[in-house]
Amino acid sequence: MRHALLLAALLAAPTFAADPPPPTAQVMARLRELETAALEGNGQSLRDQLQSLADRSPRDWMTRVYAAWCVMPSDTAWNELKDISLHAQDMPWPNLGMARVYVSWKMRDLAEQELKIALKKSPGFYPAYIVQGDLARLAGHPDAAAALYRQALEAADDPVAHAGLGLALLAQGKTAEAKVELNKGVDAWPSQPDALAALADLATREKDAAAAVKRYRQLLALSPKDKRARRALADQAFDAGDKAGSAPEYLRLVEDGDADPEVLRRLGTMLDQIKASPSAERVFLKLADADASSPEPYYRLADLAEAQGDLARAEKRLASASARAPKDPMPQVRLARLRARREQFAGALEAYQAARELGPLPADASAELAALVARLMLPAAPAKGPLDKIYAQVSSSLNALYQERVKELPDLSGSLKVRVTVGDDGRASAVDMVEDSVKDPLVAGHAALALKEAQYPKQRREPLFEFELKPSRKGAK
C-alpha cells in the first residue's frame, strides 16, 4: 500500500516537459522512498511502472530519473542517467545520480567532476554537498566532511546530511555529538545501513541492549544478509538470557554457512529452541566436527532423532557418543534407556552392564537395571553344560517368565528359534532370533540373554534352540 501511494505521488508530480522541477527537498524525499523500496525488494515493480509512464511521455525527464533511481547504484542506472543528462542539460539530478554511482565504484575524481557540474547547473544544490561530504569522509577527511554536511544542513534539514555528519563526528572522536546527529538521521529516514550500524555499535559499547537490538533489527530489515548485524543481534539476545530470541538468528547464520565454533556452542545449549528447526541436525553435526572429542553433539543428535520418532538413528548417534567417550558410562546408560524404550530388552541389559563395567552407575540407572533384571526373570546363574542341559535350563527359566506373561496376556503363545554362534572358548559370540511368533519383547529378551550368557562346551558350533510356548500346557519344548 505504501508503494502504491508513492507511485500515485510520483504520477501527480509536475514534469520537466511543461513545468519547472519540483523543489529539491521534495525530489530528495521521493528518491529516498524509491531507495527504500529497492532495499525492500520492491524497486523493480516500481521501476516497471515508471518506465511505462516515461514511454508515454518521452520528455518527462524527472520520471526517467525516478526510474533509474530504482536500480541505484548500477551500470544500468548510470547509463540511463547519462542519457538524461545529454537531453535535460540544465537538470542537476542525473549528475548527482552518476556521482553516487561513481562513489560506489570508488571513482572519486569522476564523482567530484559530476558534482561540480551539478553545482554549476544549480548553485547551492545541497544534495551535491552531501555527496561531497561522503567523498571526504570516505577519503579519511572527517573535518572537511563535517563542514560539507553542515553546509547542506544550512539549506535543508536533511536526514542523510545528519547521518553523514554523525559519522564524520564519530571519526573525530566526538561521540556524544555524533550520536545526536546519527539518531536525527535514522529517525527521519531509517534506510541508512552505515548510520544504523554505527548507532548499534555505540549502543553495544555503552551496554544499552535495548537500543542495540532496535538498531540491529532495523539494519537487518534493510540488509537480511548482513551476517555481522545478525551475529550481534543474536549475541545481544543470548547474553541477556533470551535464548528463544537468539536461536532463530544463530540458526540463520548457520543456514548461511557460518561455522563459528562459538555460534555452534551456543546453539548446542538450546535444544528446546532449535529441535523443531530443519537446521538443527546440521548444527549439531557441525558442532561434532568442530570438537572431535566431545560426545555432547551426538547426545543432542540422538535427542533430535528420538523426538522425530527415528529410534534406530538415535541409537546410532548414541553409539557415536560412546565411541568418543569410551571410559564414560553415560553414553551406555543413555543407550540402555533408549533400547528399553524400544523394548529391546536384551540390548538394554547389555548396555547397562557395559556401563557398569566402566564405573559406578548413577543411582537412577542402578535402579533401572535392577528393575529390568527383575522383569526379565533371568536365572541366578548362567546355564552351563552340554547343549541339552543348557536347553533344559533355559527352557525352565523361560517358561517361568512365560507363565507370568500369560497372566497379563492370556492369548500369548508361539515359538522361538534362536541360533547361537559359539566360539572355541565356549562363549556365545552372537545370538540371532531366527523365528519369533510369540512377539513378546520380554520373552524374546529372556531367551536371547539366557543363551548368550550360557557356558557351552569348548567347541565352535552354531546350535539352533527351539522353544514352543502355549498356555494350554506348562513347560517349553
Image (cartoon, rainbow, N blue to C red):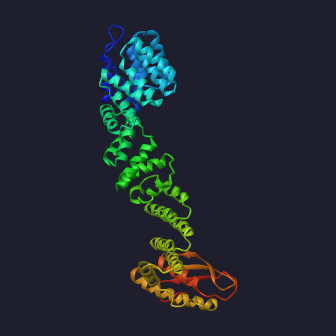
Query: Which residue occupies 31% across, 29% down?
Result: 2
Nearest the viewer among 219 and 136 is 136
In the picture, measured across the screen, residue 144 lies left or right of residue 329, that is left
In the picture, measured across the screen, residue 256 lies left or right of residue 212, that is right
In the picture, measured across the screen, residue 429 lies left or right of residue 219, that is right
Rendered view: 71 above or below 211: above
Q: How many marks?
A: 0
Q: Position of residue 81 (x, y in %)?
A: 46, 17
* Image quadrant containing the C terminus: bottom right
Residue farthest toward the top in the current orientation of the protein: 18
Q: Position of residue 280 (x, y in %)?
A: 46, 55
In the picture, measured across the screen, residue 19 lies left or right of residue 433, that is left
Query: Which residue occupies 49% across, 45% down?
Result: 256
Rendered view: 71 above or below 364: above
Q: Position of residue 289 (x, y in %)?
A: 55, 58
Q: Does residue 262 appear in this view?
A: yes
Q: Position of residue 151 (x, y in %)?
A: 34, 22
Nearest the viewer among 338 and 73 is 73
Nearest the viewer among 153 and 296 is 153
